[in-house]
Amino acid sequence: MGSVVAPLVSIVAGAVLGVTTLMGVISSQTGAPDQSPANAEAPALEYGTVSE
Amino acid sequence: MSTERPPAPAAGTPRRSRLVAALPAAWAFLLLLLMLGPALGWGYVLSYDMVWVPQLDLRSDTLGLGSALPRAVPSDAVVAVLDGVVPAVLLQKVVLVGALVGAGTGAAALVSERSVPARLVAVTIAVWSPFVVERLLIGHWPLLVGYAVLPWLLVTLRGSAPGRPLPLRVPVLLLLGSLSASAGLVTAVAALAAGTRRGDPRRTLVLLGWLLVANAPWVVAGLVQPSSATSDPVGAELFATAGEGLLPGPLAALSFGGIWNAEVVPTSRTGWAGVALTAILVVAAGLAIVRLARGHAHVTGLAALVVCWGVGYGLAALSWAAPGALGWLAANVPGGGLLRDGSRLLGLAVPLVVVLVAVAVDGLLERLPDRATRVLVGGVLVLVPLSLMPDAVWGVGGRLAAVSYPAAYDDARDAVSIAPVGDAVSLPFVSYRAPVWNNGGHRVLDPLGRYPDRPVVVNDELVVSGTRIAGEDPRAAQVQTALEAPSPEARTAALRAAGVSVVVVEQLDGYPVPAVAGTRTLDGDLTVVELGPAREVSVSGARRAAMSTAWAAWVLVPSAALAAGWWRRRRGRG
């Protein structure tokens, strides 16, 4: 029994890490662009931006 | 679900080799190297509220005798003293590294009776956390020091038996954990939740005394300072716990995110990865609660962890649901503005989640057939939080980096130091800067507020998404009015009347600086103009006495307690 469970668990564990890594990489590449000042020559010196 | 079993952390702790015991610290260190990356290079990390300068002086404002709210008391005074011993450029690294390693190893200590994979998962959750990343980026380093102290305080207090003196490390932890008002609140909640015992009022009183001493500098400075200590209620609306992409505020807070400032949220948090991390933590915590309820696992000091979670998460959720209530508090209750940043105390929620996830991890690993599979699955679980927030790597995607100040700052410090007696003002009169030399234009609180060797009146008005949040400092308002005078001579006269003898001017596009009459003592990227002798801004004797007492208590009482404890131990050994 153990000889069947161990490979199965390993495959599932690998798949989980693969999926979460893919999810993390895609999310970090496809999120909203970084805030950039409307005028690069005269950036707004604000404390921050609240999300819409 | 038993919550009050006598603490016996060592009894159930499996014997481990030194190598295995060192794994959590090694893993925490590796994680911080990955996260901080370029920020550990030579130079200063300057990001939003994190401003370190080569030499911070002990000035009246760093000691809590300024006219603004004591937001950097006692942290600035501690840095001002320590940077006389350790160069500030190294001290900042020590603080950042110490905070992250402390948080990671503290989390592992909270679950010291659990398996190695569970302890490593605890380290990952505590360090590779949206709370850590967001507070690092926004520069709340005293809060992160408090975050690192939190698990150690919980571990120390839960292991201390009623009727016996509090462990000697408690006053040290309380001091370290109270370097700012917010950090002091976090530490106080944890200390009272874990340290009080029914039927032992003396212990509670001692703990309250320690807390009072540890927080005395900012509490007393707040009580005796000239402004009203209330804040603009608009701040509570703007600083409320916020959603992160697909996650509304309360769900983001479940996985320790939800900071108000969208600019410091890792991009991965706004996508499905943020949802996945939240879901994983919630499911794991749920499974652990089932195990605890069935008696399959036990957590020492669970009640204290639940109280901490309730306060940290509850406040974050309240600020999302009813920012108006916190705004009313800020506007009407002195010091109420401390709570307006809803997710600032969210670090309190981390210890309970760390412990529950560790219970769930052990529950899962116990079902696996052999050691090799347990190691494999344990390794995967340790890495999952990293995989879901990969953009926290290498200075959070390059957003944290070490930089050097241009030589103009040293020149300005020298020029200001020879100006007549009086305070300085940095112009343009706005709180933040985004200099190109700071990692390509990253925002930072104006470093000139700390760079000179004398107090600098800074504008404490904040602008968030175009909305102004009024400041509290009456002298900042005076300076603002002076700068609106009709002529350079009138401005200079008004500034001198406000106690300002010198101004440092930086030319920033879009922020014209009104001319002032005076003697230019430095020209270049920064211009220094001496205005002449200024009216003396006096601090009342009562205020000085109050602050002296607070600082004396802060320094002497813990020192005396440590000395007494050391002496007792020595005598006991003898």
Image (cartoon, rainbow, N blue to C red):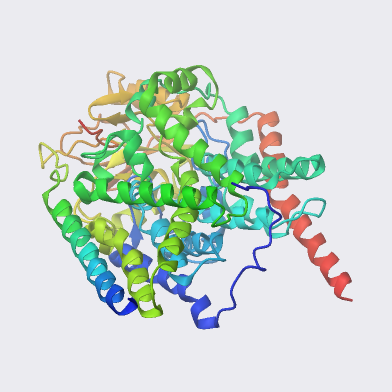
Quadrant of the rendered structure where residue B493 is?
Answer: top left
| Residue B141 in the image: above or below residue B105 | above
Q: Position of residue B473 (x, y in %)?
A: 46, 27
Q: Tell me the residue at 33%/45% (across/down).
A: B48
Say whether residue A22 is left or right of residue B119. Answer: left
Up the image or down, B394 lies above or below B492; here it is below
Q: Point out residue B176 in the picture as x, y percentages from the top left corner.
A: 58, 53
Q: Residue at x 34, y 71 (%)?
A: B379
The residue closer to the viewer here, B570 or B299, is B299
Residue B118 figure quarter? bottom left
**Furthest residue in direction front, as rendered:** A1
Q: In the depicted view, which residue is nearer to us: B242 or B53?
A: B242
Answer whether residue B486 is visible to the viewer in this image.
yes
The foreground one among B359 and B66 is B359
Q: For residue B499, say whether it is visible.
A: no
Percent across and percent down for residue B67 are 51, 30
In the rendered structure, the answer to whether residue B256 lies left or right of residue B400 reads: right
